[in-house]
Amino acid sequence: MQDVINPAGITLKINQLKMNSMKKFLLALLLVSCALSAHADETTNALPQILAGKHRAIEHKNRDKYRHPQQTLDFFEVKDNMTVVEIWPGEGWYTEILAPFLRDQGKLYVAHFSADAKSEHSQKSLQAYISKLKAEPKIYDKVELTTLQPPDALQIAPDNSVDRVLTFRNVHNWMKNDQAPAVFKAMYNALKSGGILGVVEHRNLVLKQQDIHAESGYVTEDYVIDLARNAGFEFLAKSDINANNKDTKDYSEGVWTLPPSLRLKDKDRKKYLAIGESDRMTLKFIKP
């Protein structure tokens, strides 16, 4: 007796195979999602521990209420397995956070002044920063120093190699010396396609005409956005994480009237301490 082939049965079996494959796919997708979620939780939990770390000076921790590092790095979508460039770090306030955060799974480039800088201040700043790194190798041993000294030294990292470039209160310095377009282009060149530029800067009044040399230290958001767009970036978003509505931005010594500089010293000191640090824009751009 011959077997009878049931076309409907074949169709049913094929559909079952498709459903089984789909179930396996959805299960795999769920596992990946759980793994990513777990990593995100670990990343989120790591920052508070670093912010509370003994390697951070008390005076630096006291500035967290003005600089909001956890929220700022979250807004810039910085993950601990990324390659990041920090631009002109000053005494290393953010390096204290980024270096341990990226040490095990990521990479941190820090673009500092040139050892051959004409400015004595720049040379001293670089040497103090290097001494800071050498003093705690368990935290800073994997930090890679590069040079940003326009117009000659602009290679802050290999081209198209980094996930994030971060700059904190530096744009006015570049504007002062007509260096801003070159620096924004250098940051663009270092980023991968899809990489993000995060900018924090002292925020000028919206309707105030921008001094192209930013002598007051304040810069309008529109001016920074134009600088970034002219370099090839697309504007993504802005946040008021670092806003300060008490900042009237009309001081004789510009932004340096406020803490931490307090250039007027004891004159109206309580007044300026009550205002706190400057009102700051927090902007996010992407390299297409």
Image (cartoon, rainbow, N blue to C red):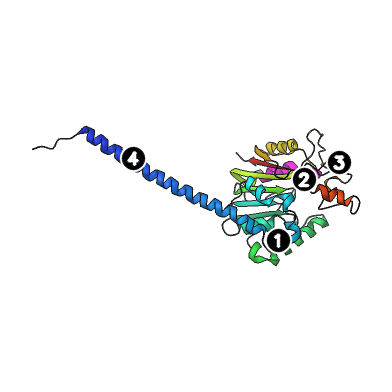
Q: Which residue is identified by label 2? A: 174
Q: Earlier in the sequence, mark 3 or mark 1?
A: 1
Q: Earlier in the sequence, mark 3 or mark 4?
A: 4
Label 2 – label 1 distance at C-alpha: 28 Å
* Above or below for 21 versus 259: above
Q: Which residue is identified by label 3? A: 250
The quarter of the rendered structure image containing the C terminus is top right
Q: Earlier in the sequence, mark 2 or mark 3?
A: 2
> Which residue corresponds to the image point at 62% horizontal and 46% vertical from the top-left?
191
The quarter of the rendered structure image containing the N terminus is top left
> Which residue corresponds to the image point at 66% horizontal and 41% vertical from the top-left?
284
Location of residue 199 in the rendering, given as x and y in whole percent from the top left corner: 70, 44
Is residue 49 visible in the rendered structure shown here?
yes
Q: Which mark is residue 56?
A: 1
Outermost residue on the left side: it is 1
Q: Which residue is identified by label 4? A: 19
Outermost residue on the right side: it is 267
Highlighted range, magenta? 169-187
Looking at numbered disc 1 in the image, what kind of residue is underneath it?
Answer: Arg
Question: Which secondary structure, mark 3?
Answer: loop
Looking at numbered disc 3 in the image, what kind of residue is underneath it?
Answer: Asp
